Image: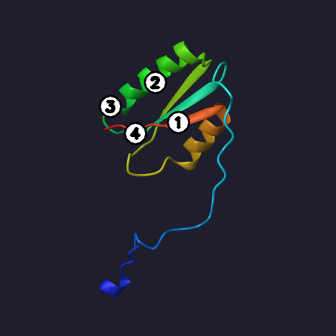
Amino acid sequence: MTGDLPFIDPTAGGSKARVARASRPMDLGGKVVGLLDNTKEQADIILEVVAETLRERYGVAKVVMRRKQFYSKPATAELMDEMANEVDVAVAALGG
């Protein structure tokens, strides 16, 4: 039975494949920023402060807040597509 368990050797080094970074705007003025709440404790409070700061200090036109269903699972494809179609820049939050 133990031979059926897939273990990953953390010393193996991992993949050498590189993923290209998404392009970034030069500034956030007039942009729509998406903030993704991971549902962990106080992530929503942290994101509210971030949203306010983005609007006041960086001239962000609009902040779109979304929340994952479960912190331990990836956001759904539908949620990711919705955000991708609605925002210029997205940030995933980590609560405590």
Frontmost of labels 3 and 2 is 2
Q: Residues within 10 Å of mark 3 (few under 14, many from 20)?
A: some
SS of the residue under disc 2 = helix
Q: Amino acid at mark 4?
A: Leu
Residue 91 marker: 1
Residue at 36% over, 25% down = 45
Q: CA distance from mark 3 to mark 2?
A: 12 Å
- Quadrant of the image occupied by residue 19: bottom right
Which of the two discs, 2 and 1, labels the residue nearer the N terminus? 2
| Mark 3 or mark 2: whose residue is earlier in sequence | 3
Depth order, front residue of 7/73:
7
Residue 86, placed above or below residue 80: above
Q: Residues within 10 Å of mark 4 (few under 14, many from 20)?
A: some
**Residue hosting label 3:** 42
**Identity, as a three-letter code, of the amino acid under mark 1:** Val
Mark 4 residue element = loop
Give yes or no for contact between labels 2 and 1 (Cβ–Cβ under 8 Å): yes
Residue found 38% across the figure and 51% down from its top: 72
Q: N-terminal of the two: label 3 or label 1?
A: 3
* Residue behind mark 2: 50
Say which amino acid is labelled 2: Val
Q: Report how far apart the C-alphas of labels 2 and 4 lie in the structure.
A: 12 Å
Q: Picture quarter containing residue 17? A: bottom right
Q: Secondary structure at mark 3?
A: loop
